[in-house]
Amino acid sequence: MREIFFLSDFGLADPYAAVVKAVMRQTAPGAVIHDLAHNLPPGDLRRASYILYESVPYLPRQSVVLAVVDPGVGSSRRAVLVIGERLCYVAPDNGLLTLAYLQDPPRKAYLLENPAYHLPRKSATFHGRDVFGPVAAHLASGVEPARFGPEVPVAELVRLPIHLNFGNHGEVLTFDRFGNAITTLLATPAQVRGKKVRIRYHHIPVASHYAEVPVGSALAYVGSAGLLEVAIHLGNAQEQLGLKQGDRVELG
């Protein structure tokens, strides 16, 4: 039985995440299900993609990742199973796996078109419960990927226009729950030491950790995923600096 790691924007105030987990446990009794995150901003594909980017290298090989951030549910967007070099992914084909592909290149992909592996009655608005959850559980219990539907070329999988790079120009990719701005700039501490980050009208010094600057001061640093981040020591950079996704970032 493979472990399942579940990511969604369902939150914890409604029963949606728990219902999906209940369906998976009924489909695959004994399945071990871990929560990656559920309190994402609704429909935020960039945030979901980043969470996978940070998580994927540390998940056990051959695990199943169930990722359900699906603003296009019920539309013509495809539902897919993607087999990576390390992990398997069950998700809508809407770009949320974009950064996971950088950590775990896709080898094969299949459409989730076989109703034998869905719930008998399928809602137009809750494919997490009716399609993705059951497929993830069947996959975890050993069903062969090709049984879920026809294979599609991995080159056709949808990708978001996100480009990580080691240069001096990037953008704000997303924010974590502390309001720290995660950028698209890859870096090592040695590469950015002594530099400053320009974002909007702010010029922010690079530091190695939060306590290196006074409480309430802004700093930039290389975060745990190897991306340059902007924060305020014991504050919220998103709110206090007026930042938003897509803001231009310059390192110099």
Image (cartoon, helix red, strand yellow):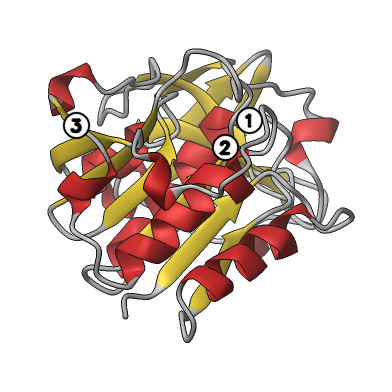
Cα distance in 3D space between marks 2 and 1: 6 Å
Q: Is residue 127 left or right of residue 5?
A: right
Vertically, is 118 above or below 31?
Answer: above
Q: Earlier in the sequence, mark 1 or mark 3?
A: 1
Report, in whole angstroms, how far the alpha carbon at label 1 lies from the one at label 3: 28 Å
Residue farthest along the right direction in this orientation: 13
Residue that appears at 34% across and 32% down: 98
Whether residue 205 appears in this view of the structure is no
Crowd band around label 2 with a 10 angstrom C-alpha radius: few (<14), some (14–19), many (20+):
many
Q: Circle 3 sits on which residue?
A: 150
In this rendering, the answer to whether 60 lies above or below 159 is below
Q: Residue at 75% of width from left, 46% of height from top?
A: 217
Residue that badge 1 annotates: 44
Q: Residue at x 47, y 81 (%)?
A: 32
Q: Nearer the viewer, mark 3 or mark 2?
A: 3
Does the CB distance between marks 2 and 1 fall below 8 Å?
yes
Question: What residue did someone put label 2 on?
Answer: 47
Q: Nearer the viewer, residue 202 or 4?
A: 4
Residue 200 picture location, percent across and down: 65, 14
